[in-house]
Image (cartoon, helix red, strand yellow):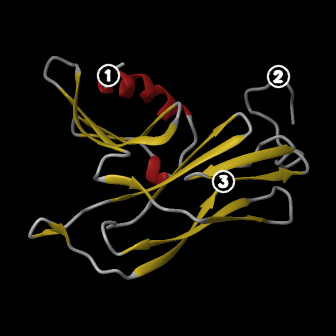
Amino acid sequence: MNLSNSVLVSVALCFSTAAFSADNSVYKGGVLTLPRVDISDQVGKYQDVTFQLTQQGTWMLSAVQEFGSRKLERVPVSGVEVIKTGSLPVSVYLRASGWHSSCGFSGSGRIHQRLEGMRFDVGITAPHTEEYVNGQIACTASMRSFKMTVPLQVYGLSAGTYSYNVNGITGTFNLESDNKFPDDCDAASDTHC
């Protein structure tokens, strides 16, 4: 399957999942922008995907950044701490931390998450630039620490043990009870509240 077919197949998935506001798709002036498109083995595989509406009424892929290319890489996470609030409904945060050199990464990291069954896949990526001086990468040897907090989308989930994978760091956490207000009822259901 080529890139444009993968993107088109994934567009429906992008619209059907809950997302951070930074992950919302936008249509403006004949341009559709998808902040991220997931594939089965990688959350956020394609980012900043733009389609241009042609005069014939078809969509043309006009730009995309691919995770794993030299311009968009995984942030090196060395540890993840699980933070849970105590009252229902429970909020769960993953606090990712690590170190990276001043060489290469620029701009803000982007966080992407999805829930597959009972596993949260979280990808933290950042733009990567390399400055060359006389054919060599120019950077200092200084290291910088970082901490990024990821609020997991756990409201409405059933009780159970959930796993997570944050850039290769894995672990689990438990929801001791169904994570919703007890008197919630779906507006589309046949029962009355």
Q: How crowded is mark 1: few (under 14 residues within 10 Å), some or many (20 or more)?
A: few
Q: Residues within 10 Å of mark 2 (few under 14, many from 20)?
A: few
Residue in front for this viewpoint, 164 or 191: 164
Whether residue 134 is situated above or below residue 170 in the rendered picture: below
- Of helix, strand and loop, which one carries label 2? loop
**Which quarter shows the C terminus?**
top right
Q: Which of marks 3 and 1 is nearer the N terminus?
A: 1
The label shown at residue 2 is 1
| Residue annotated with mark 3 | 152
Q: Which residue is drawn at 44% across and 71% down?
A: 100
Q: Is residue 60 left or right of residue 26?
A: left
Between marks 3 and 1 in the image, the one whose residue lies nearer the viewer: 1
Quadrant for residue 120, please give it.
top right
Residue 121 placement (x, y as % from top left): 60, 45
Q: In this view, does 160 lie to the left or right of 54?
A: right
- Of helix, strand and loop, which one carries label 1? loop
The label shown at residue 190 is 2
**Residue type at the position of mark 1:** Asn
Between marks 2 and 3 in the image, the one whose residue lies nearer the viewer: 3
Task: Please say if the residues under marks 2 and 3 sit with CB atoms less than 8 Å apart.
Answer: no
CA separation, marks 3 and 1? 31 Å
- Of helix, strand and loop, which one carries label 3? loop
Residue 128 placement (x, y as % from top left): 31, 60
CA separation, marks 2 and 3? 30 Å
Q: How crowded is mark 3: few (under 14 residues within 10 Å), some or many (20 or more)?
A: some
